[in-house]
Image (cartoon, rainbow, N blue to C red):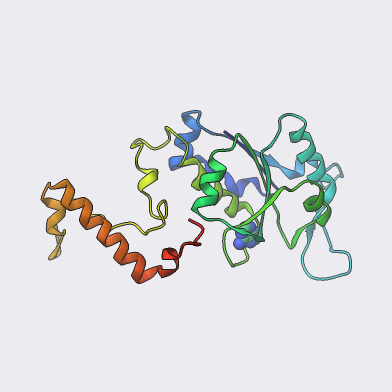
Amino acid sequence: MRIDIITGLPKLLESPLEESIVRRARDKGKIEIVVHDLRSYAHDRHRTIDDAPYGGGAGMILKPEPLFECIESLKGQRSYDEIIFLTPDGEHLDQRIANELSLKGNLMLVCGHYKGIDERVREALITREISIGNYVLSGGELAAAVIVDAVARLLPGVLNDSASALTDSFQDGLLGSPQYTRPAEFRDMKVPEVLLSGNHAEIEQWRQEQRLERTRRWRRDLLRKDNGV
Ligand code: ADE
């Protein structure tokens, strides 16, 4: 799959896209990620991408011209399944949406900055709006990085253990079970006996019980049918 990210702050995206699973997904050719610097689409001497809001108010708004030029140029090169604007106004990202996006061919992620983007961009070009939670970030870049990470790890062949993404917390609507690694005893704290037993059926049963118990304790909302997972 291919993801194009449009941003006025490309540096903010550098390390999240250069490390760990996302790096591996790119190296394996499972995902192509192209970051576009919005300033390259501004043609005045100062390469201005934002301006004060009509009607007054604090903050700066991303201007329509560079965004239209950039998005339309990309749309002229290939067709996009979704053109997503990252904004606290959007639908909340969850595992169901990550799964859905991971099945797409071409996605465009548009990062707003400052106070927002000119509404005409949203009306004419954006097909979907996604938020990563009920809080306001300085811009959409970190949200875009979150989406790319959540999606890249789901692509077939990215994780070594093919079952791994499927056994993630949330993938079946439950939290994960406790995990331990060596040593079996550390500062008087012991790894649960069952995990050392080698009895896979018992281990599986214990893990499932732990997952249910943790979900009931910490995330009762996930046990509702309409939990979005
Ligand atoms: N941009 C600013 N805040 C955001 C949020 N919570 N989610 C997505 N994009 C954003």
**Which quadrant holds residue 156?**
top left
**Which quadrant holds residue 169?**
bottom left
**What residue is shown at x 41% (from left), y 67% (from top)?**
219
User: Where residue 93 appears, x then y in whole percent?
Assistant: 56, 56
Residue 178 seen in render: no
Tell which residue pokes out farthest to the front in this image: 225
Taking depth in this image into account, of 121 and 35 the one nearest to the observer is 121
The number of numbered badges drawn on the structure is 0
**What residue is shown at x 77% (from left), y 31% (from top)?**
76
User: Where residue 45 appears, x then y in whole percent?
Assistant: 86, 44
**What residue is shown at x 34% (from left), y 40% (from top)?**
163
On the picture, is 44 further left or further right than 103?
right
User: Where residue 174 appears, x then y in whole percent?
Assistant: 38, 58
On the picture, is 195 further left or further right than 165?
left
**What residue is shown at x 21% (from left), y 57% (from top)?**
206
User: Where residue 152 appears, x then y in whole percent?
Assistant: 50, 41
Where ligand 1 lies, by image quadrant?
bottom right
Compared with 204, 156 (above or below) is above
Image quarter in which the N terminus is found: top right
